[in-house]
Amino acid sequence: MYNVKFTGRWTGCLQALENCAKNLHPMVEEKCLRDNADFLVEEIRDHIDKNDLGWTPNAPYTIAKKGHDKVYVEHGDLRESFDYEFHRKNANRAFVFVGAGDGEEESGKTFAQVMEENEYGTFNVPARPLINPTYQIAKKELIANVKDAFQDFFDHGCTF
C-alpha cells in the first residue's frame, strides 16, 4: 500500500469538473445536432440533384408535363425548402427535425404531401425513398462529426 497525501485545491478541482460535465453535454449536443442537421440537408439536396438513389424513373406522361426526367424536381422549390428545426425539450434533451419546409407546389399540394407521396409511394406513384437512404449513407459521417465536436471541445474549450 502507498500512502498518498493530497495537497492543493482538490475540492475546487472536483467542483470544476462537475460543472464542466453539466455544461458540456448541452453545448456539444446542440452543436452536434445543428452541424449534423446542416450536413443531412445538404446530402438530401445532393441526392435530389444527382437522382442517384436508384429511384423508379418518372412516367413518360410526367416527364412530358415537367419537361425533364428528374425525380423530386418540379421547379426546385421542394429541394430548396429542405431545412431543419432545432428543439430543446429540457436541459438534458434536444432533437432536430429534418425535412421539407413550408410551401406548396403549383398543384396546391404542400411540400410535406409531395415528400410523403414520393418517400412512401401511392397507388399511382412508386416509392422513391430519400430521407432514410440519405441517413443510412451518411451515418458514419454523422458519428464522426459527433466525435470531432467532442475532440474540438477538449482541444479548444467552448468556442461555440
Image (cartoon, grey):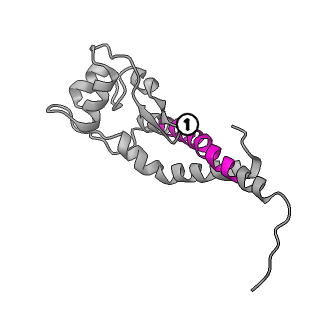
Q: Is residue 62 within the magenta segment?
A: no
- Residue pointed to by mark 1: 34
Q: Name the residue nearer the viewer: 62 or 42.
A: 42
Q: 24 above or below 112?
A: below
How many numbered marks appear? 1
Taking the image as shown, residue 138 lies to the left or right of residue 130, namely right
Can you give x and y, in whole percent of width and height, for residue 114 in the image? 29, 26
Q: Report the residue that reaches farthest toward the left.
A: 123
Q: Residue at x 53, y 41 (%)?
A: 36
In the image, is residue 24 part of the stretch drawn in magenta? yes
- Read off the magenta span: 17-41
Local SS, label 1: helix
- For the stretch drawn in magenta, what is the main secondary structure? helix
User: Can you tell which quarter of the image residue 128 is in?
Assistant: top left
Q: Nearer the viewer, residue 102 or 34?
A: 34
Of residues 15 and 22, the one drawn nearer to the viewer in this rendering:
15
Residue depicted at x 31% and y 19%? 110
Image quadrant in which you'd find residue 27:
top right
Residue 105 point in image, percent of width and height? 33, 17
Q: In which image quadrant can residue 118 be found? A: top left
- Identified at 80% across, 80% down, the residue is 3
Q: Position of residue 122 (x, y in %)?
A: 18, 33
